Image: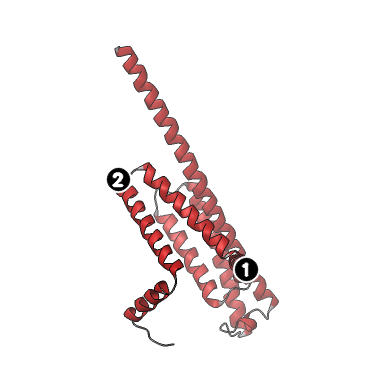
Amino acid sequence: MENISIWKMLETVANLVLSSPFFIITLIVGLILLFFMIFSIVKNQRISKGLSIIVWIFLLLFIVFRYNDYLYSLCDNLVNNIFVQIFFPNLATYIIMLISTVIIMIYTIMKKSSPRYLKVMNVLFPFVIIFLFILTLDKIVNLNINIYEQLTVFSDKNLLVLIELSMLIFVVWILLLICIKIVRKLIQKSSNKVINDFTNNDQKDVESLEL
């Protein structure tokens, strides 16, 4: 692979942008959008935030309509590749899954504010995954399988089951964590709203008594 300098990369991008009026207009609109987003963050104004959201939605719809056929094909291939990586992962995917498992487990144990049920879940799932990894590793050693050749790894039915089950459990675990995170955020937001409403009502009652 050719080693390309950063200046050559920037020059290539500039040439691509200048090669079409569409890219120039897209860049200008993007810079305007970026300005409004930064302005809304600095000034904390709802109008500019709303305008930024509207522009983002417009750009997204424009991209969807312009590249409709390709995006459909891309999403279809992406979904297929996700399922392939879950049930037939390569070595890199499997190692990343194991590293992520250990990191999540250690982070949850070390974090004191984590709920007890979350700690139990984040210890239980890693235990199962790591145990399946031990079985997988033992199977690979006993069968003297070349792990760098994917077809060879999946040639043994028992090994295939162990790997598929490990990935499936990991995916279910991550989805559960995401769902729990969303539910906790919604509950926290609802609780804060109730507390704020209660506080505001108390203040109004106090002011009415003072009058």
Mark 1 nearby-residue class (10 Å; few <14, some 14–19, many ≥20) = few
Amino acid on which disc 1 is placed: Ser
Could one spot residue 161 in this view of the protein? Answer: yes
Q: Residue furthest front?
A: 21
SS type, badge 2 = helix
Judging by the rendered image, the residue that carries numbered circle 1 is 73
Real-space Cα distance between discs 1 and 2? 41 Å
Residue 189 pos. (x, y %): 45, 39
Q: In which quarter of the image is residue 69?
A: bottom right
| Nearest the eye: 19 or 71 | 19
**The N terminus - image quarter:** bottom left
At a point 46% along the width and 46% down the height, the residue shown is 115
Of callouts 1 and 2, which one flags the residue occurring earlier in the amino acid sequence? 2
**The C terminus - image quarter:** top left
At a point 42% along the width and 45% down the height, the residue shown is 50
Where 98 falls versus 152 (above or below)? above
| Nearest the eye: 173 or 188 | 188
Q: Quadrant of residue 77?
A: bottom right
Judging by the rendered image, the residue that carries numbered circle 2 is 43
Where 103 falls versus 58 (above or below)? below
In the rendered structure, the answer to whether residue 134 lies left or right of residue 196 reads: right
SS type, badge 1 = helix
